[in-house]
Image (cartoon, grey):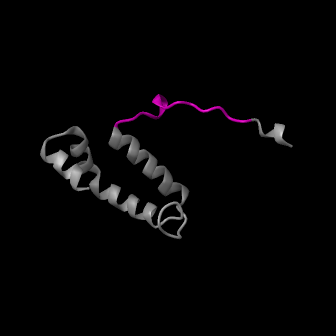
Amino acid sequence: FKAYLLLACLNNPLGLAFIQHKERLEQVLRIRNSSLLAHGFSPVDADTCGELRSLVFTFLDIRQDSLPLFPTLDTTLFG
């Protein structure tokens, strides 16, 4: 987090975005870090996952429609 604080001190847009969303980022990352996918044993619920995704999109100024679309497999072909 210190690197983002330095960026904010230098008026870098990414650092300023970090400051704006710092508290919520810390909360969501704490949940993520205690999850099965990271360092802990707790599952992450769908709401938290969606919130993290939304927060990342906002933080990085990414629009969902700018992401690539991956094909969906027809699972009926696999029996």
Total labels drawn? 0
Whether the magenta-drawn stretch holds residue 68 is answered as yes
Q: Nearer the viewer, residue 78 or 65?
A: 78
Q: Residue at x 43, y 63 (%)?
A: 33
Residue 54 found in image quarter: top left
- Please give left or right for residue 79 compared with residue 7 in the image: right
Q: Nearer the viewer, residue 78 or 57?
A: 78
Q: Is residue 32 above or below residue 57?
A: below
Q: Residue extending furthest bottom?
A: 41
Magenta stretch secondary structure, dominant: loop
The part of the chain drawn in magenta is 61-73
| 19 inside magenta stretch | no
Residue 59 in the figure: left or right of residue 77:
left
Quadrant containing the N terminus in the rendered view: bottom left
As drawn, is 72 to the left or to the right of 29? right
Viewer-proximal residue among 35 and 19: 35
Compared with 4, 67 (above or below) is above
Q: Position of residue 75 (x, y in %)?
A: 78, 40
The residue most toward the right is: 79
Residue visible at 57% across and 31% down in the picture: 69
Rendered-image quadrant of the C terminus: top right
Residue at position x 34%, y 55% from top? 25
Place of residue 36 in the rendered image (x, y in percent of width and height, measured from the top left): 54, 64
Q: Vertical placement of 68 versus 52: above or below?
A: above
Q: Residue at x 29, y 58 (%)?
A: 23
